[in-house]
Amino acid sequence: MQTFLTEDLAVPPPEPPRPPTAGPADWVRRNLFRSVGDGVVTVVAAIVVGFVVFRFARFLFSTGRWEIVRTNLKLFMVGRYPADELWRIVVALTAVAFVGGLIAGFVARRHVVAGTVAPDQPVTRRLVALVGRLWPLVVGVLLLLFLSSSPGPWLTAAAIVVAAVLGRLAGPYLPRRSAVVLVLGSIVLAAALVWFLTRPVGWDRWGGIMLNLFLATAGITLCFPLGVLLALGRRSKLPLIRAVCIAYIELFRGVPLFVLLLLSAIALGFFIPTWLEPPGLVVRAIVVFTLFTAAYVAEIVRGGLQSLPKGQTEAAQALGLSPVKTTFLIVMPQALRNVIPALVGQFISLFKDTTLAGAAMGFLDALQVANAATAQDAFRGQRLLAESLGFVMLLFWIGCITMSRESQRLERTLGVGTR
Amino acid sequence: MRRTFIRGLVPLAALSLVAGACSDTGDEGGEPAPSGSGAAPTTGGTDDTGTTPGSVATGSTPTTAEEVQTGESLLDTVSAADVVRCGVRDDLPGFSSLDDAGEHVGFDADFCRVIAAAVLGDATKVEFVDLETDARFTALQSGEIDVLVRNTTWTASRDGIEGATFLHPTYYDGQQMMVAADAGFESIDDMDGAVVCVAGGTTSEGNVATEFARRDLTVEVQSFEDVDLLQEAFIAGRCDGWSSDGSQLVGLRSSFPDGPDALVIFDDIFSKEPLTPAVRDNDTRWAQAVEWAIYATIQAEEYGITQANVGDMAAGDNAAIVQFLGGENADGVTLDAGLGLDPAFAMNVVSQVGNYGEIFERNLTDLGLERGLNALWGDGGLQYAPPYR
Amino acid sequence: MATTTGRPPLWRDVRVLAWTFQIAVVLVVVAIVFWLLDNLRVNSQRLNIPTGFGHLDQPSSFPIPGSDFRQTQPVRDALVEGFQNTLRLAITGIALATVAGVLIGIARLSQNFIVRSAARAYVEFVRNVPLFCLLFVMYGAVVLNAFPRVADSWDVGPVAIVNVRGASTFWFEGGNWKFVVALLSAGIVAFLVARWRSRIADRTGTPGRTGLWALPTAAVVLVVVWIVLGLGATAPEIDGARVTGGITMTPEYFAALAALVIYTSSHVAEIVRGSIQAVPRGQGEAANALALSGFQRLWHVVLPQAMRIGVPPIGNQYLNLAKNSSLAAAISFPELTKVTQLTVANRSPAVPSFALLLGIYLVLSLVISLFVNLANRRLAIVER
């Protein structure tokens, strides 16, 4: 991020040589008042930006009536999930945090062993770095905690932090070869948690941002393998396979997701026989997201495959690797590494698109909560859409910006494009 | 570039295949004329109530339709699943809305409970499915729901084309117009060139346009899928009038943020809107079961059976009432009408939900709705149940 | 079976295996599709629901706001009307999103700290919130909450009247086709003039100043054609509770357009920024060495090369915008999806209606891809 400010100015015009000075005055001259025209632009832009910031701040601190968010905080977060079953969500989050910490610790030690990061940085410095990395998330969580009126969320947050720290501390002591166990364990844990959370109420009363997060996670996990297969199929030498994959990809890329969701919500029953119970709406939404996003993932992965020099395949063949091994051990890892930013971008847009499911299928997801809250007796007709929608946008912004910043970081650590 | 384009053509070809297959099947079906590709609404396969069996299956080769007809009925499926999936809405005060606990309450919701009480013996065994207006018939057709009790007007083409069988109207309604009290309109005739907001995908849209055309007035009809959004738009001045079924308008006015006095509902009623529960076509047993569950509430009111006195009535000495409530008559015999319902279904309905008058009173009277057309036939209304014999 | 030619047995022959595998896959796909269609046929027959397109000739039973469409016209016309609205939204949206996106993308690289930061804040915010949220904000919070009632309209004489019922401005009297004719002739003349100027520039080496020549000429032609065709102008006026005259943009259209443009422009801006950065620095430095002005450097040297990199991803954004226009259904703008939903609510069978809808979007996507590919081909470096 920081690099944009220094390097990315289109191309600086020729500057007269001048004595190297530093300091605020010089910075102001170079960044704000380079020339007369630049000065005018600065003044005009400052007025406009100042006005927008003023109006925004006034809305945030003075004119905005945030009672609607405070009252409906539970709805926004978890929808109509029964209040006396909320402990399940706490348990699930804690478990996820612990495993996340465990994996982070495990990976960190491998980095230390591999010598890609310096070991033994002071804890305070690492904490500062972590907060600097995740500040939108930290700010968001603190905001939620201060909006809440009960001790529950505080305890939850504390439990999550403790679990994450414990996991992070325990991670480095895992046996070196436990990567496969960790991955499989995560998948089993995910399935177990879904079962655990749906046990009391099924899917029906899931809602709020929890539902959006769940739909996105499920969609991302499931679409990825399908997308990779489609990409391989599209590059396959077998003409019929290629044709099928191309037809699939172009079909799904050419139609709107919203219409697909509508169609699956109301017309699925026509396409299955009567003896077959149609799956629930949440399952259908996940299937549609998976099928739709897989087509996009396939195109991204195909781009990654195309960008790879042919020599890689040839070298693998020269070593006598089978085609399957060549693909999954040599070609695919490199291709995927090259397209991480695009993949994360696709996942971010999937997360944002989960809002469509609420409208098309009648879920009470975060966006629908924002709409429904303004129709409650206490808030009806008071024009509070700006507040409730603003809050939902903030929730999504935190999720998306965190993902995109982490992907940029990952891109840097993996050194995409620098090797 | 050319190759990309050709690649793009592949799905198109696939789609045209699909489309072709669709229209083919229509012709192929041949025999049952109404399912042909160019069916006119008036040739819909069912006659008026759709309760006569086999109007489609007759004359056709033994199709799946017939198999379903003679074989499994939704009645069996619902009994096996032990829950009735009832298509309702969640945003209409008085008919079906959510209370503070997130439960469905209202006139329509209570009729869902009536059906569950009659079929399953337990009024709580309802799964409420909230439906958007424009998805309701497709949801019914595709089997998302077992019965549609969603403030739905019975019309000829819905009966015919939508594959729905309408049962007994639970509420006789008519469309009216609501305006802001300070807007300066005295009647619809003052509203030339006005913008009228309606709920989209309903009969209201066409009715408004037709009514204004009949009065030689111009109108712009803006439809909204979401009543909440419609109300926001109305408050913001997006439209001059808000038109819908009279009962809905009364309900909406009663919960209007600026108080009910801020709105005026014109007296003109410009359409017939019999709000009627519907089930899928070609499932007579299920249709009859649901229909008689509804009749039971009306019959109970006629007999004067209420939630409070149903126990006494069942033990009383009026033979007709005892028979209606599924008791043994003087000779120890119980009437099973062969509807596939428990002989005591009326007992369950009345004791667990109430009679028609009680359901009306509980949900609609507070909104300011009169019985009017919905009084019993003996009181000059239209609610009339066939005899239970 | 092993033969005398020494070929491997059938079950080891890669080509046979490959074809068997392919045919098996295709058979499975065909079987699934056939199974689905057969279920559709059986279910539709069981429920007495038509599976063809006969509903297109039935009366639609609903009016469409913002147009002359009557409820007595057939469903076919309603879909045409809806498709026109989709096109209006998509084409206008693409044009505006391109302009805004390029400007913001350039602003993102400005040497001016405030401009740069503001552009970055805009992009980082808009890119990371759902379009659907923006749409509801534009309609529910901006149009319905912030725009005045008709009586208190923001009234700027004949130029514009804005209220919660829409934004009106002056317009050519008597129909859009005359406007199209005028605009087309102006565009053609502008193009010819620009070509003539650039030819002269090529021949003589003097500055072409194509823009300075073409735009005024086009304006003159526009006015002349307007007078020749005898076109009047109508200005909007507040007439009691309504606005008459001029041309009016419905609030639903405004909200949908604004949301689509805001959202897409942020994505386009990121692509433009990335493409400009991908242009080798030496190009800009060379331009500086030739003493080109800042604008000349950008317009003649940097942007043309950046376009080459940016066109395919920007084309994808156009596709997304066209498909995202279906979201406008949620705020009741009568575009194709909304109209299809209305027809389905009014007796049209769901599956054929939605199949048609998907088909139309597919064709629209293909046409946009075609244009993008053409543009791409024009821009591509001709390799020797």
Image (cartoon, coloured by chain):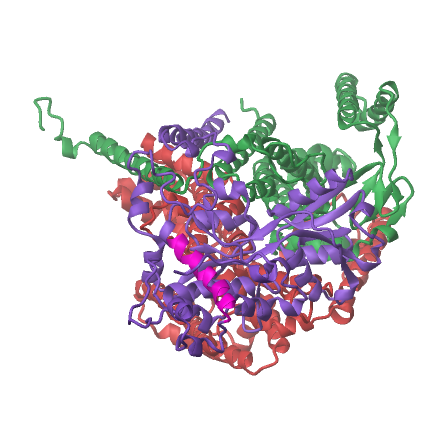
Chain colours: A red, B purple, C green
Q: Where A389 falls versus B33 (above or below)?
A: below
Most extreme residue toward the right is C157
Please tell me in which quadrant of the rendered image residue B317 appears: bottom left
Magenta-colored stretch includes residue C125: no
- The chief SS type of the magenta part is helix
Relative side of A203 to A374, left or right? left
What is the span of residues highlighted in magenta in the rendered image?
B286-304
B287 falls in the magenta region: yes
Residue C75 visible in the shown view: yes
Left or right of C280 on screen, residue C2: left
Q: Residue B310: image x %, image y %?
A: 45, 75
C33 on left or right of C60: left
Q: Nearer the viewer, residue A397 or A19?
A: A397
Q: Position of residue A388 (x, y in %)?
A: 66, 64
User: Residue at the location (54% across, 31% down)?
Assistant: C56
- Give the residue displayed 69% in from the left and 45% down from the top: B208
Q: Along the line of sight, which residue is nearer the eye, A208 or B197?
A: B197
Q: Nearer the viewer, residue A9 or A19?
A: A9
Residue C283 visible in the displayed image:
no
In the displayed image of the protein, which residue is found farthest to the bottom? A151
Residue at 66 percent across and 52 percent down: it is B244
Front position in the image: B202 or B23: B202
